Image (spheres, rainbow, N blue to C red):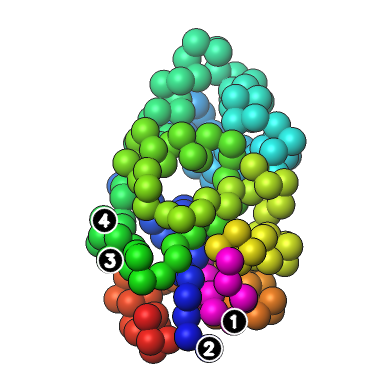
């Protein structure tokens, strides 16, 4: 069956980390290893709960600040420095713009409840996608099979007519297990080559 929809992950695909130096400097200033800073922000209990909408992004960051011993009025600067490394994958964004209206284009991201706002206000992605499926909004997270079924349902296509792109192999494999085509994202040339092989 011909491909009708292409669904992209957000982090490390559409937006990627540039120079890690600001994060290293932040960890040093806070007196903790960088991997511990990453754990608190991405892999802590509050991060996981915020990812499925049980906590807001503000509640999560308050917990991070408390764990780091950062005063509430200093937390915005910590957040800004941490995210300053993010860079838009402009080549991929430009490519996505060429896909519509020939294909339905979706975003499927394990993310907190501020992603929609971040995409619009910080990155200017407003209108780039037909559907945004954000884990904090739907109460499900990859690799739960239900979130892939939800994504294709929102886009109005059967799984076999959709392609899912993610940098996490387990998520790509989970999508494949429910019938989608899936590409484990490594870099843009590899992605474009694999999409071309699917006649996109």
Q: Residues within 10 Å of mark 1 (few under 14, many from 20)?
A: some
What separation in Å lies between label 1 and label 2 (alpha carbons)? 7 Å
Residue underneath mark 4: 90
In this orientation, does residue 108 appear? yes
Q: Is residue 6 magenta?
A: no
What separation in Å lies between label 4 and label 2 (alpha carbons)? 30 Å
Q: Earlier in the sequence, mark 1 or mark 2?
A: 2
Q: Residues within 10 Å of mark 2 (few under 14, many from 20)?
A: few
Q: Nearer the viewer, mark 1 or mark 4?
A: 1
Disc 1 and disc 2 in contact, CB within 8 angstroms: yes
Q: Quadrant of the C terminus?
A: bottom left
Expressed as whole percent of the image width and height from the top left, the position of residue 24 reads: 40, 39
Residue shown at the point (42%, 54%) measured from the top left: 129
Q: Nearer the viewer, mark 3 or mark 4?
A: 3
Q: Nearer the viewer, residue 37 or 58?
A: 58
Residue underneath mark 3: 98
Q: Is label 2 in a helix, a strand or a loop?
A: loop
Q: Which residues are magenta?
A: 156-166
Disc 1 and disc 3 in contact, CB within 8 angstroms: no
Q: Nearer the viewer, mark 4 or mark 2?
A: 2
Corner quadrant of residue 161: bottom right
What separation in Å lies between label 3 and label 4 (alpha carbons)? 13 Å
């Amino acid at each position: 069956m011909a491909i009708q929809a292409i669904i992209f992950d957000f982090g490390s695909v559409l937006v990627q980390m540039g120079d890690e130096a600001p994060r290293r400097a932040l960890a040093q200033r806070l007196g903790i290893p960088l991997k511990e800073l990453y754990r608190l922000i991405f892999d802590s209990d509050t991060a996981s709960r915020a990812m499925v909408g049980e906590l807001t992004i503000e509640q999560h960051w308050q917990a991070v600040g408390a764990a780091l011993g950062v005063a509430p009025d200093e937390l915005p600067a910590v957040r800004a420095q941490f995210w300053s490394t993010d860079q838009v994958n402009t080549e991929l964004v430009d490519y996505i713009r060429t896909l519509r209206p020939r294909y339905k284009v979706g975003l499927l991201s394990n993310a907190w409840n501020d992603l929609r706002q971040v995409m619009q206000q910080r990155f200017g992605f407003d209108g780039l996608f037909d559907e945004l499926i954000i884990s904090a909004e739907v109460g499900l997270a990859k690799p739960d099979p239900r979130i892939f079924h939800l994504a294709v349902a929102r886009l109005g296509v059967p799984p076999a007519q959709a392609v899912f792109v993610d940098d996490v192999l387990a998520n790509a494999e989970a999508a494949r297990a429910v019938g989608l085509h899936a590409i484990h994202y490594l870099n843009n040339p590899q992605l474009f080559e694999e999409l071309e092989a699917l006649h996109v």
